[in-house]
Amino acid sequence: MKKFSFFFILIFLQFAQAQQFEVNYTAIVRKTLPDEVRQEFLKDNLREQLKQNEEPDPCQYQLLISDKESSFTYIEKISNNQDPNAAVIRVAPAGFGTTYKDLNNSTWRSNYNVYDKKYFSVDPLEKFDWKITKEKKEIMGFEVRKATAEDSTAVYTAWYAPKLAVSTGPATYWGLPGLILELEKSSKTMVYNEKYLAESIEIPKKKIKIIKPNQGTQIHANQIDDIFQEVNDRRNQMWNDAQAVDKD
């Protein structure tokens, strides 16, 4: 892991008063598929494909912060998967677009593309009941402190840097007295774990431009799965109708 010199940290913190940061994160997902799905892979001797689905390649995001606004954007990269026909699910825990947070009014936004039709969501930010512990460690030369929270679905563990005085972090996570440099979510309902880890942090030389999704139809984030399902059902029905006409 990269580390900063003590001298650099001092200079960095002097400039950090501007509260503009560019932070790059790696996101890792680890999961176990349901037994019936795993057996289908194993029955067809697709052990490598099973591993690729349960241990997908890490993905990258970039967090841009300007005072109380931030945007967390997926960075596209070339897949390391050697078999283009393998049944591999691309996994991006914060989505393939941008998650925008505005701490001024405690809202967040995200953008979606459903078969080339654009949507964007606007929702209130979830408030995490963080419990700050005495545990400490270092990430990239910054002292970070551990905080935990939980809800009905998951347990969250965050490591935040008090000297980076912005109350935000990756994805929709926020609410601690410092920038979250590491965040882990462990599901209570399935074997699923996701982790965000900051790999680099810079203070931009120019004023950064925060990405704020606002194109397409406005929805709530919890509606997007139903929208995908409805469009898929409609496309499948059209395909079935076309097949029936061809048979006639």
Image (cartoon, helix red, strand yellow):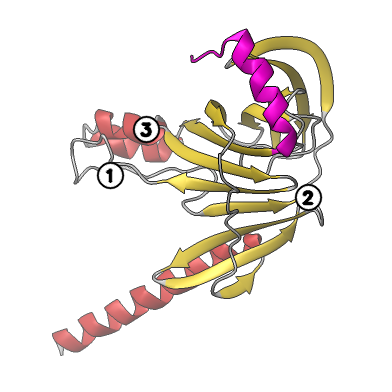
**1 or 17, which is in the foreground?**
17
For the residues labelled 3 and 2, the Cα–Cα distance comes to: 31 Å
Q: Is residue 161 magenta?
A: no
Looking at the rendering, which quadrant does residue 139 occupy?
A: top right
> On the rendered structure, is 110 left or right of 160?
left
In primary-sequence order, the first of circles 1 and 2 is: 1
Dot 3 amino acid type: Asp
Q: Is residue 158 above or below residue 22?
A: above
Q: Residues within 10 Å of mark 1 (few under 14, many from 20)?
A: some
If you read the primary sequence from the N terminus, does the residue marked by circle 1 or circle 3 appear first? 3
**Residue 111 position within the rendered picture, expressed as x and y whole percent measured from the top left:** 54, 61
In percent of the image, x 64 and y 23: which residue is there? 12
- For the residues labelled 1 and 2, the Cα–Cα distance comes to 40 Å
Residue that label 2 marks: 103
Three-letter residue code for mark 2: Leu
Query: Quadrant location of residue 82?
Result: top left
Split into 4 quadrants, where in the image is the C terminus?
bottom left
> The magenta stretch spans which residues?
1-19
| Residue 10 is a magenta residue | yes
User: What residue type is disc 1 on?
Assistant: Ala
Q: Is residue 84 left or right of residue 197?
A: left
- In the rendering, which numbered label is found on residue 57? 3
Indicate whether 35 appears above or below 136: below
Residues tagged 3 and 2 counted as in contact (Cβ below 8 A): no
The residue under the point 51% across, 63% down is 112
Q: Position of residue 6 (x, y in %)?
A: 63, 9
Whether residue 156 appears in this view of the structure is no
**Image position of 165 (left or right of 211):** right
Closest to the camera, between mark 3 and mark 2, is 2
